[in-house]
Amino acid sequence: MRLQDKIAIVTGAGSGFGEGIARKFVAEGAKVIVADRDAAAAARVADALGAAARAVTVDVSNALGARAMVEAAQAHFSGLDILVNNAGVGHVPQPLEALPEDEFDRIFAVNMKAIYLAAREVVPLMKARRSGVILNMASTAGVSPRPRLAWYNASKGWVITATRSMAVELAPFGIRVVALNPVAGETPMLKTFMGEDTPEIRAKFLSTIPIGRFSTPEDLGNAACFLCSSEASMITGVAMEVDGGRCI
């Protein structure tokens, strides 16, 4: 029970990596706000986790959404110890000059601006308590970018730099900031990254991962649990690769 009595918000927790993190956190003793823009998905996960979870329907790219999920944590569980900025969007592979402006704006809003909006709400609370952990979901795309995903790659590189910047500024207040770099996984975003889901394209992707499989929600849940627990109390500013060797 490495997160016993901790209170966490996990964004994008209605599916994929976010769901895996929410499930692991509850299994390790935490209470979790399951935040997602898909109300039915958030409710499904929260219902499965019982009294230790509450579903909140929010758009994390909106200031009101960021405030609503923090208020929900305080209203339902009377506090906040951990913020997991997991929600993210991608784009199908294409030449960098071809991406429509509205898609670029959506990537900026969800992958980048949402972290800023959440920090505005959460950091003052954590500073007052002089403790807390913020975990941002980056990607191997921010370390070893693939062609034709330029703007997604760039957004995840931003997340890594933001994590390091936040970590060095917030350390004196007892707040740790860390990130995870998953490789492509069995999540709703996989088809987006590949362009289309065929055995041939899957085989091509898997050939770049030495361990020979995709990341799973359980992989990310386990890594997030460690980084957000007291076992990682000396770890801040890192972007841990959970990628089966993809970035070696």
Image (cartoon, rainbow, N blue to C red):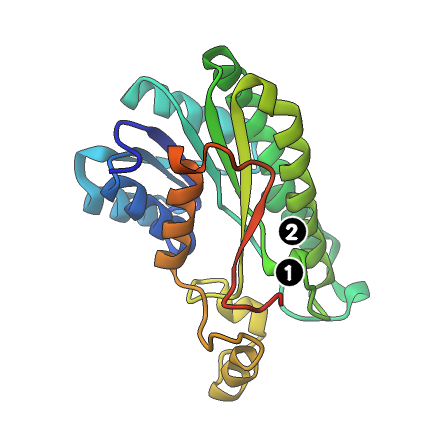
Q: Is residue 156 above or below residue 76?
A: below
Furthest residue toward bottom: 200
The residue shown at (62%, 67%) is 248
Give 46 or 123, whichever is nearer the viewer: 123
Q: Is residue 68 above or below residue 101?
A: above
Indicate the quadrant where residue 227 lies.
top left
Give 123 or 15, whichever is nearer the viewer: 123
Left/right of residue 20 with respect to residue 156 in the rendered view: left
Q: Give residue 169's position: percent from left, percent from top.
A: 66, 24
Alpha carbons under labels 2 and 1: distance apart: 6 Å
Left/right of residue 137 with respect to residue 160 in the rendered view: left
The residue shown at (60%, 38%) is 237
Helix, strand or loop for disc 1: helix
Quadrant for the N terminus, please: top left
Residue type indicated by callout 1: Ala
- Inspect this view and state whether residue 229 appears: no
Q: Is residue 147 above or below residue 113?
A: below
Question: Counting residues from the N terminus, which is met first, the one under dot 2 or under dot 1?
Answer: 1
Q: Give residue 141's position: percent from left, percent from top.
A: 64, 60
Residue type indicated by callout 2: Lys
Q: Which residue is mark 1?
A: 141
The residue shown at (36%, 51%) is 222
How many neighbours does mark 2 have within 10 angstroms: few (below 14), some (14-19), or many (20 or more)?
A: many
- Inspect this view and state whether residue 191 appears: yes
Give 202 or 54, whichever is nearer the viewer: 202
Q: Which residue is mark 2?
A: 156
Residues tagged 2 and 1 counted as in contact (Cβ below 8 A): yes
Q: Give residue 11's position: percent from left, percent from top.
A: 44, 41
Helix, strand or loop for disc 2: helix
